[in-house]
Amino acid sequence: MSVWDPVSQTSYVNDLGVTINSFLANANTPGYSLSYAASNLLTSNFNLAGNTSLVYNVAALDKVPTNAPYLGQVYLSTTNAAASVVASMSNSKVNNMQSSNGYVTTINGSDLNYATNNEGVFSAATGGAAYFGSGIGTNWLGYSTFNNAAAVGTAQNMWELTPSSNSGLGHATVSELAGQWNLSSAGNLTYAVPGAAPVPLPAAVWLLGSGLIGMVGVARRKSSKTAA
């Protein structure tokens, strides 16, 4: 998750500690949610409630193809762009989104282990690869057809993008996930899928139901003998 002030040219980025595969395994499940408490580093450096220039995004990438040059790559990105805009992404554009890998690696590869301690990095434009504006920006360094960021307090949709073939001119495979991300003015980040998760019946209820079915079967057999 990244927060950026393009006016002061400062940014904050935090590794959320969840892998692409584990996230996608639940991302469309009704009632599924993730919640992250506000970071002191984030709230102490940004006036989240009063600074209207702030934007945030959530992104992830796996740039290693399983079938070179494109197939097997996976990218996740927030955006509130129309579906037709996201669907206009070509395989080559999706592949070029890997240009932001250095930005992600800077965070994941730190000895401070940000993914584990749920802390982040505050950086200025002169701060190197951890700076949002030079590391990913609001359009994946110019390679996405959509804006990947929104104002703090604005819920954002999440999309999965993968190359559909090894042809750079082909349209990428894109799908909108069921949940939305939202960074509140208090600094709390959530992902939530609408709907309630199915509630399993207690074991006792299942046993009672099975018992009733069995009793009906016994009663029917007894009735058959009497009639004979």
Image: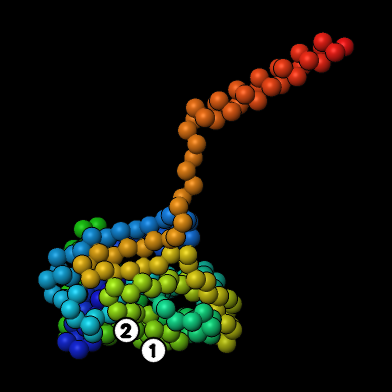
Numbered disc total: 2
214 and 145: which is toward the camera: 214
Asked whether the viewer can see residue 130, the reply is no
SS for dot 1: helix
Q: Which residue is mark 2?
A: 137
Q: Are marks 2 and 1 in contact (CB under 8 Å)?
A: yes
Query: Where is residue 5 drawn, in percent x and y?
Result: 22, 83
Identify which amino acid the numbered label 1 is placed on: Gly
When the figure is inspected, residue 222 is found, relative to residue 28, above or below; the finding is above
When the figure is inspected, residue 14 is found, relative to residue 206, above or below; the finding is below
Query: Where is residue 64 drawn, in percent x and y?
Result: 45, 71
Judged left or right of residue 52, residue 181 is right
When the figure is inspected, residue 214 is found, relative to residue 111, above or below; the finding is above
Q: Residues within 10 Å of mark 1 (few under 14, many from 20)?
A: some
- In the image, what residue occupies the spot 38% across and 80% down? 148
Quadrant in the picture for the C terminus:
top right
Q: Which residue is mark 1?
A: 142
Q: Residue furthest left?
A: 44
SS for dot 2: helix
- In the image, what residue occupies the spot 17% across and 78% down? 50
C-alpha separation, residue under disc 2 versus residue under disc 1:
8 Å
Question: Closer to the N terminus: mark 2 or mark 1?
Answer: 2
